[in-house]
Amino acid sequence: MDPLSALRDFVARGELEKIVRVGDEFRFAGDYSFPCAAETAYRSKQGNLYTLETLVYFLRHHQLKHTEYLQSARLRRVPAVTLPDRKPLLDYLLGRVASSDAVELLPPHPVPAPAADEYRPDDLPLAPPRPADLPPAPPVHDPGFVSTIRALERPLKDREALLECRNRDFYSVLTASTRRQEERQRLDSQQRKDGLVAKSRLMGSDTGFADDAGGYDATPRPKMLHLKGSKVGEGVPIILVPSAFQTLITIYNVKEFLEDGVFVPSDVKVKQSGGEKKPEFVTVRKKFSRDQVVAAYEVRDKPSVLKPEDWDRVVAVFVLGKEWQFKDWPFKDHVEIFNKIIGFYVRFEDDSIESAKIVKQWNVKIISISKNKRHQDRAAALEVWNRLEEFMRSRSHT
């Protein structure tokens, strides 16, 4: 088996960790071994064949941002996968696609030498010399000659043997898939629970009660927060962002900005996603520590799909600075909007004053970030959180 097929086979079975490097070769759970520098059948868009070492390292670090992955590969002196190859290569290795035009058929590997008790060509008797007047020997494609060769062949594997060979069974694939599905369902349930718990804390409501296992009951009963004739409904609070790319904060980069305190331009995030479909919403969490969630919010960019009860949950909006952003909103004007919903306008600190001329007429908090100094992003994100929480607390006493 060639290195690419073996690697794809192990990844499909969830056994990437069984590929171990020993010296200058990779050992595949005792089934195969290949040199680390062996070229695979996958050709990059730049024309070179990726080595086995490159593909194994990429599979183990593809979750990293591409810039971080390149830096990590460079430090370990491992040739890196290029950005254009990143998504199609990952889709092929993970089995999301059945084939790829980038895969080239390589010459078959030599068959292992036969054992001592197997047939060897030297064991055949030599044919007697042929007189010059006799016709020539039959060509190699003669049916009788081919039949003689096939009679001496010993098949290494057939379809039955492939299904029954050691360390390969479909039950392990099924159980691994089931575990992943259960984990996704558990995380979804935890997200809903985090949102309800955070809502109850922010509203000053009953904090729920412990269940028999010592955990937190996921169905607290928060008090309604009245906001001058309106109210924040039960459930996870909603933050709205513009869908237009003219604004700095969109649904593509809001999670990284608020959770990690890092601003990444939306177009860069779109490229990193490999053209994946835009999510309907993302969940953003404010954390007190790595394991303790203080608050959870839904971030959406399509106000037109919100139901009346959904508008009761809207607590904040990132503004574009254009009046048409609020078209068809269930409010009289921007004065009413920003009395009931806190507004944020994120801008680069060296932008002209004219860019925020309209926004300065609204009751909106202006958040400035640097174009180049990414270490300052965290302070900007914390300012958003602090003002949002202050707003939520002030309205809870209204």
Image (cartoon, rainbow, N blue to C red):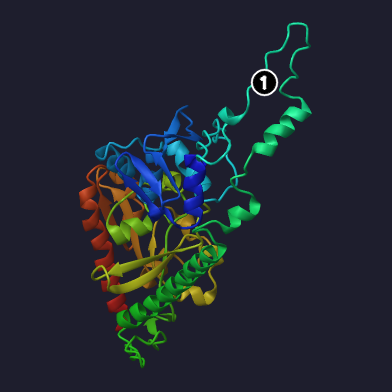
Q: Is residue 217 above or below residue 48?
A: below
Residue furthest bottom in the image: 212
- Which residue corresponds to mark 1? 127
Q: Residue at x 46, y 37 (%)?
A: 84
Q: How far across and down, in percent of the image, does residue 301 sit?
A: 47, 59
Q: Residue at x 30, y 40 (%)?
A: 73
Q: Residue at x 73, y 28 (%)?
A: 145
Q: How far across and down, in percent of the image, does residue 53 sit?
A: 37, 40
Between 350 and 143, the one lying in front of the other is 143
Amino acid on which the number 1 mark rests in the picture: Ala
Local crowd at mark 1 within 10 Å, few (<14), some, or many (≥20)?
few
Quadrant in which the C terminus is drawn: bottom left
Between 214 and 50, the one lying in front of the other is 50
Q: Residue at x 33, y 60 (%)?
A: 344
Q: How far across and down, in percent of the image, does residue 45 sit?
A: 48, 31
Whether residue 186 can be seen here: yes
Between 342 and 207, the one lying in front of the other is 207
Q: Is residue 233 left or right of residue 213?
A: right
Q: Is residue 141 above or below residue 203?
A: above
Q: Is residue 328 above or below residue 115?
A: below
Q: Is residue 8 left or right of residue 350?
A: right
Residue furthest top in the image: 132
Whether residue 274 can be seen here: no
